[in-house]
Amino acid sequence: MCAAMNCCVASNNEVTRMKGSFVRTVRLNWILSAVLACFLFGTTGSVFAADDAISVADVKQGLDTVWVLIAAFLVFFMQAGFGMVEAGFIRAKNTCNILTKNFLDFCMASLGFLLIGYALMFGDGNSFIGFKSGWMLTGVEATSGGVPLYAFWLFQAAFCGAAATIVAGGMAERMNFKAYLIYSFLISAIIYPVIGHWVWGGGWLAKMGFGDFAGSTVVHTTGGVAALIGTMMLKPRLGKYGIDGKPKAIAGHSIPLASLGVFILWFGWFGFNAGSTLGITNKGFDIARVAINTNLAAALGGIGAMIAVWWRFGKPDLSMAMNGALAGLVGVTAPCAFVEPWAACLIGLSSGVIVVYGVELLDRLQIDDPVGAVPVHGMCGIWGTICVGIFGKEALGLANNGFIYGGNPTQLGIQMVGSVATVVFVLAGMGLVFKVIDLTVGLRVSRTEELRGLDIGEHGMESYSGFQIFS
């Protein structure tokens, strides 16, 4: 019993010593923290007091730069999404070809936008084009839009690459690879930057008050209309339309791959739209509004397309629902900062319906668009641009209120003028580019190469080695 009591006493003493040690450790930590705080205040507080405005500005610019770079990385990641969507929606024998085009798109866009594109888009010039500065990023200010020039350039280059890669899907499974590389460089260096200058570079549309926050016109209408003229000149794939003119379904080889691509694009679109704030403005409220509008439009776009295709054909087609989500994203890209969430829902829902009937319209016209690039980006890009003039609010940064707020048609008219001008310019410019390419290197591969698959004919390799089937 005595031994037990002695053990208890020893145990209590040990607990007491541990408590005392813990209390001393806590006290020591508080003392060290207080000393460190005094040191930091003493060494840095005077700096802030001496030049508080500069310090705050530096911190803000740093945060804005990080935000823009993260957004640029997200937009770059969308290249993977585009590649997977397009690869999944086409046949296995052309998978390597379409992925190579998506890969080289960003390479050519980066080069073209560095050498020429940035100067045409953001350089000093006139209302139509920039030309006095910006060549190879020379003769321009070190900062642009409140962030370092290099960060701003990278963000804009990612947008340029997105516009270029849209065309790959519309002209898939039959376009000459050399011709595609030439096209990719030219749209990135000339066509896209000119339209960008009109809207974002202080050009004539910007002076009119045209609203395109993140690119329904500059990026998506440009890419979608270029895909339209390209696929019209390229003609349909072999076997796509019967003698009676009716379309025949050419199924894509991997819906799971396309699904993953759509999710990546949806994710990357948060950088695409929200990153276009070019900084953490208005205490983050602008970013939050853009982000929620982006998400709601995508969700309602998928629902709208699924309902439309289900009602039209009796089955809830997944591929069409996925294109509907992308259509909603495209549609809300221009108005995402200028509208309330309820309007984003309507824009997304209507865009999803448009894409279903857009695909049908192209088939009736025998325009073969394997992945739906024209309805998703072209038609819904135009619709999103018009929606700015319908649902946009002056209080949210637009030049004028949209039509539903008082019935003033001014902003709606401006949006229509900008959209029509973009369509006409791209049709003419890219029509000329494709015609010259066709007369020189040729737009389309041979019949034999198309039947065997472009993976073998263009690249000498198979996407799925040992599983290739030729027809």
Image (tube, helix red, strand yellow):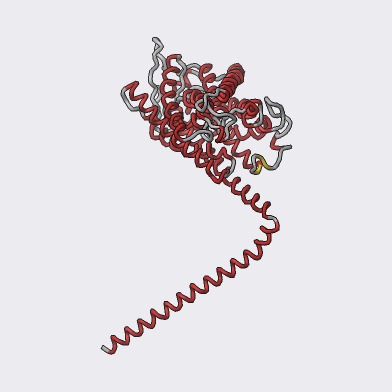
Q: Is residue 384 visible?
A: no
Can you say which quadrant of the picture contains the N terminus?
Answer: bottom left
Q: Is residue 346 above or below residue 13?
A: above
Most foreground residue, 234 or 372:
372
Could you say which is closer to the camera, residue 64 or residue 50? 50
At 57% from the left edge and 30% from the top edge, which residue is drawn? Answer: 212
**Residue 126: x percent and y percent?**
71, 27
User: Residue at the left extreme?
Assistant: 1
In the depicted structure, whether residue 395 falls above or below residue 180 = below
Q: Does residue 76 lie above or below 245 as drawn?
A: below
Identify the residue at horizontal 47%, vertical 23% (top origin).
375
Q: Residue sitting at 45 percent across and 24 percent down?
A: 372
Task: Pick the quarter of the image with the C terminus.
Answer: top left
Q: How many marks?
A: 0
Residue 225 horizontal/vertical position (percent): 54, 22
Can residue 125 be seen? yes
In the displayed structure image, the side of residue 468 where residue 172 appears, left or right: right
Give residue 421's quadrant in the image.
top right
Give the farthest residue toward the top.
244
